[in-house]
Amino acid sequence: MANISALGIGSGVLNSDLVDQLVEAERAPTENRLDTRTQKAELLISAYGTLKSAITELRLPMRQLSAPDNLKAFSATSSNEDVSVTVDSTKASRGTYNVNVLSLAQSQSLASSTFADRDSTSVGTGSFTISSGDKSATLTIDGSNNTLQGLADEINEAGIGVSAGVIDTGSGFRLVLSSEETGEANAISVSVTDDDGNNDDAAGLSQFVFNDTTQNMQETIAAKDARVEINGIEITRSTNSFTDVIDGLSFEAKAEGVTSTIKVEQDFGAVADRVGAFVEKFNALQTTIKGLSGFNAETGQGGILSGDTTIRSIQAQLRNVLGRVVPGLENASIRTLADVGITTDYETGGLSFDRAKFEEQLKKNPDDVTALFAEQGRTSSADVEFLGSGSGTTRGNYAINITQAATQGGVLGDSALTDGVVIDSTNDEIEFTVDGSTNFTIQLSQQTYASAADLVAEIQSQIDSNSALNAAGQSVRVGLDSNGVLQFTSGAFGSSSNVSILSVENGAALGLSAKTGTLGKDVAGTVNGQEATGDGRVLTVTGAGGAKGMQLQVAGYKDGDLGRVNFIEGIGEQAVNLVTDIVGADGILDAKTDSLSRDLERIQEERIRLEDRIASYRERLVSQFTAADSLISQLNSTGDYLTQQLAALAPQNNSNR
């Protein structure tokens, strides 16, 4: 390339400033056009991003309203702060409960006799077995750890739910054991195999024995279960928290001897708040849309998305979902949003919310209001309950056919139970396993039972009060079959449901022996001819079709044609699906922004080509100007030469005159 700094030397006119001006004149039209296109694309991307954010904000309140449980909110109050209460709206129902706290649960503490020193006084040697609840450990006590502190360290390291410490009483040292969990089931039991040959005296390791037959340690605090009366019915638990007594209700006892009235009521205000949040977000979306696409009369200009077909399409789809009668509710008391006080201002596109009307309709027509917003399955048979839908479930009316009823597993005794059975220490224990997961033992009250029915009631009472069974949330029903034989039935349904007798003391009097029970059966059938799988009483549709993903709970021992289920998809669910489609990865807004991003990439490519073209143009100008400047310089030199020659001839001309 010619040296641009030398331009103009020959002419004084064709200089670098002139090249810059010509280059800029060539660049400006294209660059301005590209700048305008870039600015517009970036403004559109920003506008679509703002619109997407406002639409996304609408999804959360609509998702809340699409869940049926959120439309039947409950609140619970306690008249006494010493009985605290929480409520789960998904399971709760209205009710009033009188609670009387008889006793609080507490953990057990034991203390040994006094020893002269914690680190040097021998406590004996042998095998030391300690247990609490369902955990136990056997410790070896020898010359390396046969002190109070050594024994305490071994117990703490065993990790069985018992903490051990050594207390200085001022007159000696005592080992203190404390169960970490409250309740009688977590009481501490200690037995030993003492090297001195006597396992229950007050010497050597035996001085720490504490079990049903020998108590060589002092019980300073007894293990206790919490006991409360609820509406006059006594309930026992190992902790002060009662979470499985009343569906959806949990309460905690904090003091003995107190009473409280607990009220569970539907919280219509909480539901109205959720609806109000939806209206607020929808109106915020309309404000955003107006700002992006509306016309400003003062400035005479429209928004960046004015006339945009995308925004018009989104508005039309939202109005269609929110303004129409919900399919399936054509003949119901509540059919549209207007029926519950949510109306549209067609001038602004916003919604207004009559809160009082909404709460009134929710009280009068709770099922229809729920169906208006959320999904709902209405079954024609009392033996079928709709539990939920799947992502593939679509609204419609589906036939239910049960080919195999769900049954409960259990075990039947060997012979009839007679009247006048005597229960004593030789036949008072029965060990069971339930649903393949929980083993437990009951101990019957020792007495003579006048009738078989009395003994059945005693067995049922002992099973119902068993802490291991209650902790697992399982149950067993006891009865007599048509021949008077004891029958134990699991409270669960399905192929994991069972009761087996692991052992029974002298079971002849009860007509029992160790015996494996018979498994229950899972429900089986079809919904609208679509394949379904069963788990207990729950039938889940797995086959292709409109009912896919639907879950139904079928009453046990019921089969055949069980009517139909009408699946209604409320406005909330429809709106959530619509918003997800709009703002999703494959949605219309992402498609727009992706297209604009590609435009920006093409503009950048055009800028690169422009720079290449301008560089070539500049080079051509410099080359042309250099050549012209050189020619002018030569002409100037020739002119100077001629001038000099003419000047040299001038005196001669003058002398010849």
Image (cartoon, helix red, strand yellow):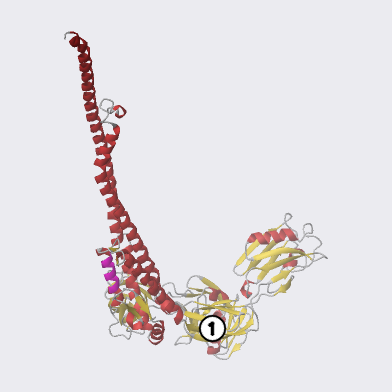
Which stretch appears magenta?
311-319
Main SS of the magenta segment?
helix
Q: Where residue 43 sits in the image (x, y, percent)?
A: 32, 56
Q: Is residue 452 visible?
A: yes
Q: Where residue 4 sits in the image (x, y, percent)?
A: 29, 29
Total marks shown come to 1
Q: Is residue 314 magenta?
A: yes
Judged left or right of residue 101, residue 286 is: left
In front of the other: 506 or 569: 569
Furthest-left residue in this view: 657
Q: Where residue 457 sits in the image (x, y, percent)?
A: 54, 86
Furthest-right residue in this view: 171
- Which image quarter: residue 25? top left
In front of the other: 109 or 371: 371
Q: Is 194 rendered above or below residue 322?
A: above
Q: Is residue 196 magenta?
A: no
Disc 1, SS: helix
Location of the C terminus by quadrant is top left
Judged left or right of residue 285, residue 648 is: left
Location of the N terminus by quadrant is top left
- The residue to which callout 1 is attached is 460
> Which residue is pictured at 31% across the width and 66% down the height?
298
Instruction: Name the kind of residue labelled 1 in the image.
Output: Gln
Q: Where residue 535 sits in the image (x, y, percent)?
A: 39, 72
